[in-house]
Amino acid sequence: MVYGAEALIPVEIGEPSTRYVQATEELNDEEMWVNLDLLEGRREATLIRMAAQKQLIERYYNRKARLRFFKIGDFVLKKVFQSIKAANSGKLSQTWERPYKVRDIAGKGAYELETMDGKVLPSHWNAVHLKRYYF
C-alpha cells in the first residue's frame, strides 16, 4: 500500500509485447549488420548537408560583411569603449577617439597603432573598431 492505494505493476512489465516475444538473437544480429551498412551512407549524407550549410552561412556573411582594410601609414579613428569613457560623460560624448596612424599589420584584420607623437599603443586593434580618418 502506497499512500492508501494498491501498488500495481504496469502492463508492459507484466506482459511482454509481441515485438519482444518475436525477437531472436539471429534477427537482432542481422538488423545490427543492416544498420552498420546504412551508417556509412548516413555519414556521407550528413557531411554533404554540413558542407552545404557552411556554404550558405558563408554566402550570407560575405553579403552582409563590410570588411575594412588599412595600409601602413593610413590615419584611423579608434572607437571609444564604455570602460574608457569618463564617469559623467553622457550620450552626446565622443564615440571616436583622435586620429592614430597604422604602424603595422598584426594579422587578419588586426592593426598596430601609434599616436601622432610616435608612441605605440600597447595592444592590437581589430578593424571593426577602427574607421578611416580623412584630413
Image (tube, rainbow, N blue to C red):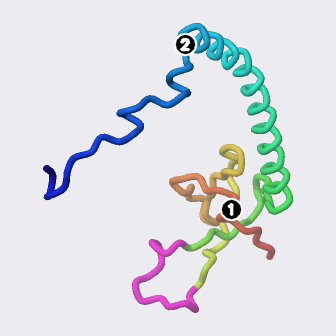
* Residue shown at the point (74%, 65%) measured from the top left: 75
Looking at numbered disc 1 in the image, what kind of residue is underneath it? Val
**Which residue is found at the position 68% from the left and 43% from the top?**
107
Q: Is residue 101 above or below residue 33?
A: below
Instruction: Name the element at disc 1.
Output: helix
Q: Kindly identify which numbered label has been placed on residue 24.
A: 2
As drawn, the label of residue 128 is: 1
Q: Dot 2 surroundings within 10 Å: few (below 14), some, or many (20 or more)?
A: few
Q: Is residue 114 above or below residue 35?
A: below
Magenta-colored segment: predominant secondary structure: loop
Residue interval drawn in magenta: 81-93
- Comparing labels 1 and 2, the label whose residue is closer to the camera: 2
Q: Where is residue 30 shown, x and y percent of the image? A: 65, 11
Residue type, mark 2 in image? Thr
| Residue drawn at x 45%, y 72% as measured from the top left | 83
Residue 79 has which mark? none
Q: Secondary structure at mark 2?
A: loop
